[in-house]
Amino acid sequence: MASDMEFEKPLLEIETKIAELMKISESGNVQCDTGIAELKRNAEALKKDIYSKLTPWQIVQIARHSARPQMKDYIAGVFENFVELHGDRLFGDDRAIIGGFAKIDKYRVMLIGHQKGKNTEENVETNFGMGSPEGYRKALRLMKLAAKFGVPVICLVDTPGAYPGAEAEARGQAEAIARNLTEMATLKTPIIVVVTGEGGSGGALGIAVGDVLVMLSNSVYSVISPEGCASILWRDGAQATRAADALKITAPALKELGVVDEIVQEPLGGAHRSPRETIAAVKESLLRHLKRLTGISSKKLVDRRYEKYAAIGRYKHR
């Protein structure tokens, strides 16, 4: 597996050697079973060592990895009968945010999420997962449709942030996100939010107000990117590592602050190394929360949602 993450390179070197030895062994010319077994043990030990002491900046890199499961991977691996709905009925259809009715086991849901790309062509099509005003208005239209039919909303968050271009601002980017926050706060149907990769700024928050906020263990959720924070505070984007430490953007830090309700543990080595297991873990979490939330009245849901967000940010006396 190719990777531009510096801290993974020693592991990749061993895995490359394993692949080479396996190819030689399969050719039948030389038996390399003993060497392969030893290298696999070394690789596993190194993987445990690397992933037991990740820094916040390294977690940011993992969260951005192009091989992590994305929206369409979750549609294929978790849901059935997905029917995509298009357009905001005002301007157009945003490919960075997609959504529609779907089924997960016995539950009919409205699924909404950011879609990035896995290659240059897909990244251009989806604008690197950066939503435009029409994307957030489409998301809100679908949420209201879900409330009308009494089905829960599931939002999968994975974006560096909302698109900051002049044309997006001209079409009301800030207003669209602000309206989503207001409407989601009182939406009379369950809302489950899962941060699957990078949850950046208002672009993430625009579909992330819910009854439950779940994060994958190597995902990040932040008011601003580390690079953006470093540019503002120190006038130096190269200070991103320092900013990542200060921002408290990792799942454990946010769980301690009361922002996150649950952390879904990724397989050792990250979701990019074990997509299927990661997708299965997310499905298990979603089903558990759906079972609990679908039995709660809409009034109680809205009241609890208000209390949840009102409590975030309070000081605790030690």
Image (cartoon, rainbow, N blue to C red):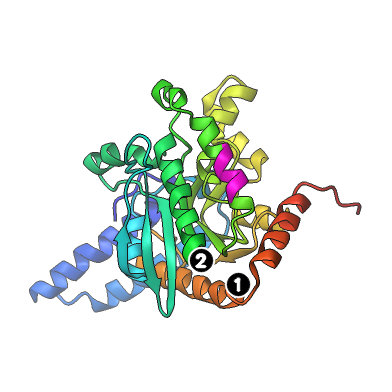
In the rendered view, does 160 fall on the left or right side of 122? right
Q: How many marks?
A: 2
Q: Which amino acid does the dot numbered 1 rest on?
A: Leu
Q: Which residue is drawn at the image coordinates 26% and 39% (left, top)? A: 125
| Quadrant of residue 96 within the rendered picture | top left
Residue 105 part of the magenta segment: no
Image position, residue 89 (x, y; %): 36, 41
| Quadrant of residue 318 within the rendered picture | bottom right
Q: Residue furthest bottom?
A: 106
Which residues lie in the magenta part?
Answer: 178-183
Image position, residue 255 (x, y; %): 67, 58
Q: Nearer the viewer, residue 83 or 49?
A: 83
Q: Which amino acid does the dot numbered 2 rest on?
A: Pro
Residue 181 part of the magenta segment: yes
* On screen, residue 70 above or below 173: below
Q: CA distance from mark 1 to mark 2?
A: 9 Å
* Residue 29 seen in this snapshot: no
Label 2 sits on residue: 152
The crowding category of the residue bearing disc 1, from other C-alpha atoms within 10 Å (few below 14, some 14 to 19, many at least 20), is some
Q: Main secondary structure of the magenta part?
A: helix
Label 1 sits on residue: 293
In the rendered view, does 210 fall on the left or right side of 39? right
The crowding category of the residue bearing disc 2, from other C-alpha atoms within 10 Å (few below 14, some 14 to 19, many at least 20), is many
Image position, residue 150 (x, y; %): 51, 67
Where disc 2 sits, the SS reads loop
Where disc 1 sits, the SS reads helix
> Which quadrant of the rendered structure holds the N terminus?
bottom left
Q: Nearer the viewer, residue 259 or 67?
A: 259
Dots 1, 2 in contact, CB < 8 A: yes
